[in-house]
Amino acid sequence: PSCHLTRKKNDLEAVRLTYTDEEFDELCFEFGLELDEITSEKEIISREQGDTKASGASDVILYKIDVPANRYDLLCLEGLVRGLQVFKNKLEAPQYKRVSPLSGEPQKLIITKETEAVRPHAVAAVLRNITFTQERYDSFIELQEKLHQNICRKRSLVAIGTHDLDTISGPFTYTAKPPGDISFKPLNQTKEYTATQLMSLYKTDSHLRHYLHIIEDKPVYPVIYDSNGVVLSMPPIINGDHSKISLKTKNVFIECTATDQTKAKTVLDMMVTMFSEYCAQPFTVEEAEVVYPDGKTCIYPELAYRKEKLSSKFINQKVGINESTEKIAQLLTRMCLLSQATGVGDEIEVEIPPTRSDVIHACDIMEDAAIAYGFNNITRTTPRTYTVANQFPLNKLTELLRQDLAAAGFTEALNFALCSQEDIADKLGKKISEMRAVHISNPKTAEFQVARTTLLPGLLKTIAANRKMPLPLKLFEISDVVLKDETKDVGARNSRRFCAVYYNKSPGFEVIHGLLDRTMQLLEVKPARGEGYHIQTADDSTYFPGRCADIFVRGKNVGRLGVLHPDVINRFELTMPCSALEMDIEPFL
Amino acid sequence: MADTGVLETLLQRVEKVDDGVDSLDVATSLGVDHQVIVGAVKSLQALGDVISAELRSSKHWELTEEGTEIAEQGSHESRVFSCIPLEGLAQSELMKLPFGKIGFSKAMSNKWIRVDKAHEGGPRIFRTVESIEDQVREKLFLVQKGNSTQLEEKEKNELKKRKLLSEVTVKSYWITKGNSFSTTITKQETELTPEMIASGNWKEKKFKPYNFEAMGVAPDCGHLHPLMKVRTQFRQIFLEMGFTEMPTNNFIESSFWNFDSLFQPQQHPARDQHDTFFLSDPAHAHQFPQDYLERVKKVHSEGGYGSQGYKYDWKIEEAQKNILRTHTTAVSARMLYKLAQQKFTPVKYFSIDRVFRNETLDATHLAEFHQIEGVVADYGLTLGDLMGVLHQFFTKLGLKKWVEVGNSGVFRPEMLLPMGLPEGVSVIAWGLSLERPTMIKYGINNIRELVGHKVNLQMVYDSPICRNPPTHF
C-alpha cells in the first residue's frame, strides 16, 4: 500500500529545491519514492469530469508521489521537503524539542475512568505562536485527514482534534457520557445537538457516516470539556464549533484520543514535528500534562529520540557493499538518522528521531543505508546457494496429465475457485447443506459465497459463454476444489480434481467413457474389478437417471461420470445433451 | 470436365488461326450453346497454359419472343391483310383473331385496307391493294441471321420500341494459343492414390496444381489454456534455477500463517474486511505450534530479537480467523518454519498458485489471481544477491523492466527469528502475478477474457506457445 502526495511544484521551488521533472523523478527514485504522475488540477478534473468542468481550474503543476505506507513523515509537504533537503545535504535534520510554557503551568488533560468503556487513551500538546498561511493551514488539515485514514485506521485506533487554545481554558477533562447527556454545537453547524441527535444527523453525511460505527453501540460516548464546560470534541466523530481553528489561530491545542496508546503517541509526535516549523520558536512544542484516572501523570508529546548501536560490518554484509564506518554514518545521516562512528571498532551510533516510528529494527536502518547508497550502485551478485530442485509431486502429475488430455482432443478451461452457493448446489440438483463447502462471511457479491466443491459448474458456465462455437465442445480442467476437513488445522483442505465435459447434439457418453479409459491407460490402471478400475451404476441427482456411474479404482470410489440431467442443462442455460466426468487425482500419486 | 470432343475441336480451331477465335463465333459455327464453349475454355485453363483466354464483352441485337413469332409467321398487319378475302370481312370477325387489333391499325396506317362503315350487316373491311411487302418480317429475318448491321440504327430502335428487338450484352472469350499449346488433352489427376503408387503409373500422370493460397484444415485437437502455458514456463524457469516447488494446495489459511507469522500487525489494512475474504464456516483454525505462537505474540506486542515490536495488544482471536489466503507467502512461512525445526540447510523454494483478495473488481483485477513467488534462504545473503537473482530470473523470462511487475525484499528478522531460524540466515523473496505477464504476452486487455468462464474459447484455440526468452514481450 502507498499514499499519494499531491504537491504543487512551486512549493518545492519556494524551499530551494529546483528541479526539472526528470531530475525530480530521479531524486524521488534515489530517495526510495516513486513519482507516480506529473499532472495539474485542471488535468485531473478534465479526466474525471470532462473538459468543460476543467476550464477554470488551476494548471499549476502537481506531483503525485507514492510514499511507503509506514512513512508518515512523508505524508505532507513539510515533511517531504525536509526529508529531501536533508538527503541532498541542504539542511541538517532539525532537533525537535519539548518545552515548558514560558509562563504558568502546562495545559492539563484529565482522563476520567468512564473512558475505559469506550476509548481509554488520550495525549495532548500545544503549538505556541504558530503562523498559518492558507497553504500551511490546508496542509495542516490534510495531514490530519491522511493520518486518520492510515495509521489511525479510519479513526478507529486514533482520532485527532485540533483547537484554538485562545477560545478555551484548561484544565480539560476527557470523559465519557451517555449520548443523551452530551449536548453541543458541532463544527460548522448553527445549533446545539445531543450526541444521539448527531448520530442520526451524520447517518447521511458522506464523510462522517464511516466513523459512526466506532462508538455507535457503546453505552457512553467519549467527550472532552474545558473548565467552563465547553465541548472541545466528541471523538472520534466531530469537534465542537466553539474551538475551531482558523487562519488567525495563534495557539493550537492538539489532543489525540485512542484505543491504542502507542499509535496515539506516534500520531501526536507526527502532527507536532511536522508543523512546529511554523512556531515562533521553530521545532519546539509546548508540553501538556495528562492526568490518568489513577492519579498518575504523564508529559506529552514524547518526542523520544532512540539510540541504536550497530556495526558497519552488519550494514556492509546485509547490503552487499564495502564502505567505511564514516561513510555509512554519513549515508544514514542523510536519511534523517543522525549517525556517527563511536570509535569503538566499527561501531556506529544511530539516533532515531520521533518522526521515524517506522524504524523499529536494525534491518530498517540497513535499508535506509541501502537507499542512501543507491540501489543501482549495489553490485548484483549470484547467491552461492547450492540446491537440487524438486517438483511438488501433485503438480508434476497435473502437468503431465494436462498435456495428454489436450492431446486427447479436450481443451483446457480455467475457472474461479470461488462461486455462488447456487452454482455448486441448486443448479446441480443438490442441497447446499449436503456439500462440504467452505463459506465466506464477507462476500461483496454472490459470486464469492463459497469455495467450489466441484469443477463441473465452471466448465458448464464456460460452455454457456461459448455457445456460438462449433460443436462438439470438449473441455477439461484439472484444479483444486476446497472441502471442509476436521482433521486439518484450519478445518479445510484442497482436493485436486480432474473434470471433463462433452457437449454436442447427442450426449456422447461413449466419448467421456473413452476419455476415462484413456486417462486410466495414462495412469497405468487396467480395466478390471479389484486391482484395476471399473464403473458401476450410481444414483446422482446431477445426472440423468440410469446414465450415471461411479468410478472405482482398486476398489475405491474416486469419481463419477454420466449424462447430465436435463434440468441441470437448463439451469446452466444450455440446450444440448452433455456428458461429464469428475474424479479425484490424488489417489494416483 | 467438359466433353473431350468439344475440347479437342476447340483446340483444333485455335490451331488453324494465327491470331485467335471468339468463343461466340465458335459456338455459332459448331451449332452449340455458348456455355458449352465457355465450359471448355475453363477446363482447358485448368490444365495449365494450353490456351490463353481473354474475357470480352460485346453488344448485339436479338429478337424478342414476339419478334421471333413475327419472323416465323409474318407481322400482325400482313396476317390481317392475308386473311381478308376479296369480298371483305366483317370487322367484328377480324377483331376475334389474336393479331386482329394490332394488325388492323397497322394495316390501316399502311393503307393496305379500308373500312366500309355503312355496309349492310355492320362495318366491313376490304383490301385496298393487290399485294403487300412485309418489311417488318424482312428486317427481323436479317437480325435473326446475324446481319443486323444491314439495318439502320433508326430502324432497329423502332423495332425495339415495338418490343420485337432487344439489345443484349454478351460476354465471350478471345481464345489464343498458350505457351504449352497442344491439340491433344492429357487428363490431370487431383491426388496421388495407393493404386498409382502400387502400379507406378504416377510417372505418366499429370497432377492438378494445388492452390497454395488457401488455408489448410485445422487439426482436430485439444488446446492448453494460455495462462497455464505461461505457468508451465515459469515453473520451468524456477526448476532450471534449482528452486523446489512448495505445496501450495491449501487455499484456506489461518490469519496466523497468512499475517501474524509474517510480522504483519493485527490492525494492518490488508487484514480489513474490505481486502480479505474471511470464512464463516469453518470460521477458525484450531491448531498452532504453541511455542512458536507465543514467540510471535511476543515479538508483535513487546518486540525482541533486536526489534521494538509494534507495542499493541496481540489477540489470539485475530490469529485464529480463517481466511482465503491473500498471498502464497503464507505457504512460504509454513515452509520456513518447518525448515527451522530441522538442522538448517540452505533452500530455494518457489510456488505459482491462486491467491484471493476481496477487492473492487475492474478490467485488470479479479478476486482471485495466481501469485508467482521465489524464496532463497541461506547464510549471509545480501541485497546484491536479491538483485542478482532477480536479474537472472527476469532475464530468463525476457523481461527487462522487471521492477514494474513485481515486488521483492528481504524477510524481516521479526519473522524469521521467532521461527527458530539461525541468526545469520537471511531470506530473500520476490513475487509477481502470473496474469499480468500473460496479458502482456497474449495482448489481452480485459482479464475476464483470459481467466474464468467468460473466456473466449477461440482465443484459447488460437493462442501460440509460450517460450522464454519470449519473442513478443
Image (cartoon, coloured by chain):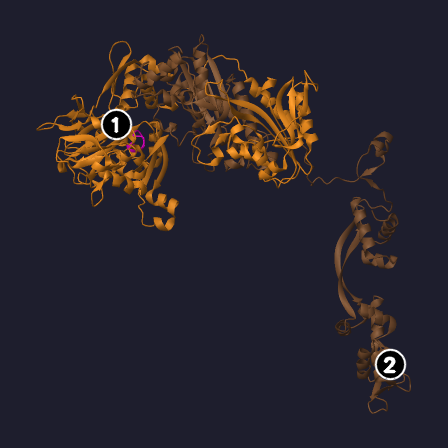
Horizontal and vertical percent for residue A499? 60, 28
Q: Quadrant of residue A18?
A: top left
- Give the residue furthest to the top: B343
Q: Residue flagged by tag 1: what amino acid is it? A: Ala
**Secondary structure that dominates the magenta span:** loop
Chain (brown): B
Q: Which residue is identified by label 1?
A: A117
> Which chain is disc 2 placed on?
B
Q: Is residue B51 visible?
A: no
Q: Residue flagged by tag 2: what amino acid is it? A: Phe
Residue range of the region highlighted in magenta in the rendering = A147-154
Horizontal and vertical percent for residue A237? 26, 36
> Which label is found at residue A495?
none
Chain (orange): A
> Quick one: label 2, few (<14), some, or many (20+) residues within 10 Å?
many
Residues marked 1 and 2, same chain? no
Horizontal and vertical percent for residue B468? 55, 26
> Quick one: label 1, few (<14), some, or many (20+) residues within 10 Å?
few
Give the spatial CA distance, label 1 vs label 2.
130 Å
> Of A194 and A85, which appears nearest the observer?
A194
Q: Quadrant of residue A207?
A: top left
